[in-house]
Image (cartoon, rainbow, N blue to C red):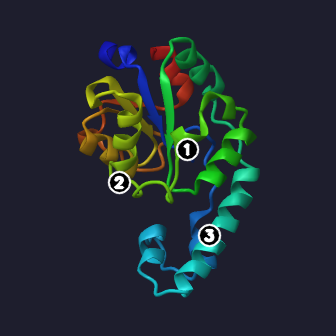
């Protein structure tokens, strides 16, 4: 754990990690006419054009609706403030669009901790669990994976971190089965992580 606390390069998932989980994924899938439990981005990517583009535009609208009503996770500002004071580089890797991510960050009072270029969405990089976004951020920061941490609440976040070689922190809300093989540190909230750091 002391090793993680010393790391200066932090990549965060957004929904359910820095924000309270508000997305109704069942509703989003229903609106997009997708099967239950399907991977939304993979399902839309497989659609033929121009149907794919229409569905992606609808997804953008649905996500923006949720971004505007999102609420901060407990301890988010205090944690980001601590990392900022330690001169850490902070990035976002989300399967949302960048515009939606920036709106969500503004909604939770955390926008000023992140430069826009360090907020990567599905249009900037290949979506998680692909490690492409983490690799891009580390390249920009001139950092190596053993100096970095990936923080998220879902398997895709942890798989991306593992594939890149960073430390991984699972924010475990008790919704999913834990993934100990993908997790270096499991906490129940950002407040819990703040106490540890």
Q: Regarding mark 3 in the picture, which secondary structure is present there? A: helix
Q: Are marks 1 and 3 in contact (CB under 8 Å)?
A: no
Q: Is residue 119 above or below residue 49?
A: above
C-alpha distance separating marks 1 and 3: 17 Å
Residue 55 seen in this snapshot: yes
Residue ID for mark 1: 14
Residue closer to the observer: 160 or 17: 160
User: Which class describes the residues within 10 Å of circle 3: few (<14), some (14-19), or many (20+)?
Assistant: many
Residue ID for mark 2: 129
User: Residue drawn 58% across and 73% down?
Assistant: 56
User: Which class describes the residues within 10 Å of circle 1: few (<14), some (14-19), or many (20+)?
Assistant: many
Q: Are marks 3 and 2 in contact (CB under 8 Å)?
A: no
User: Which class describes the residues within 10 Å of circle 2: few (<14), some (14-19), or many (20+)?
Assistant: some
Q: Regarding mark 2 in the picture, which secondary structure is present there? A: loop
Q: Which mark is residue 136?
A: none
Q: Is residue 194 above or below residue 72?
A: above
Residue 169 seen in this snapshot: no
Q: Quadrant of residue 97?
A: bottom right
- Count of numbered marks: 3
C-alpha distance separating marks 1 and 2: 14 Å
User: Residue drawn 24% across and 36% down?
Assistant: 165
Q: Which mark is residue 59?
A: 3
Q: Where is residue 7 drawn, in percent x and y?
A: 37, 19
* Earlier residue among tags 1 and 2: 1
C-alpha distance separating marks 3 and 2: 19 Å
Residue closer to the observer: 121 or 2: 121
Q: Where is residue 73 drawn, in percent x and y?
A: 63, 35
């Amino acid at each position: 754990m002391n090793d993680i606390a010393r790391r200066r390069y932090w990549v965060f998932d957004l929904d359910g990690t820095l924000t309270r989980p508000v997305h109704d994924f069942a509703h989003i899938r229903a609106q997009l006419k997708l099967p239950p439990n399907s991977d939304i981005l993979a399902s839309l990517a497989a659609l033929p054009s121009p149907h794919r583009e229409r569905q992606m535009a609808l997804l953008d609208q649905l996500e923006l609706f949720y971004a505007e009503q999102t609420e901060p996770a407990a301890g988010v500002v205090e944690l980001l403030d601590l990392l900022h004071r330690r001169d850490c580089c902070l990035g976002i890797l989300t399967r949302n669009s960048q515009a939606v991510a920036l709106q969500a960050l503004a909604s939770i009072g955390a926008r000023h901790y992140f430069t826009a270029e360090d907020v990567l969405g599905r249009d900037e990089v290949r979506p998680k669990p692909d490690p492409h976004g983490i690799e891009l951020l580390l390249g920009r920061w001139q950092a190596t994976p053993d100096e970095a941490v990936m923080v998220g609440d879902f398997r895709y976040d942890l798989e991306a971190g593992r594939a890149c070689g960073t430390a991984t922190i699972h924010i475990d809300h008790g919704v999913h089965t834990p993934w100990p093989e993908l997790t270096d540190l499991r906490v129940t909230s950002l407040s819990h992580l703040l106490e540890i750091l």
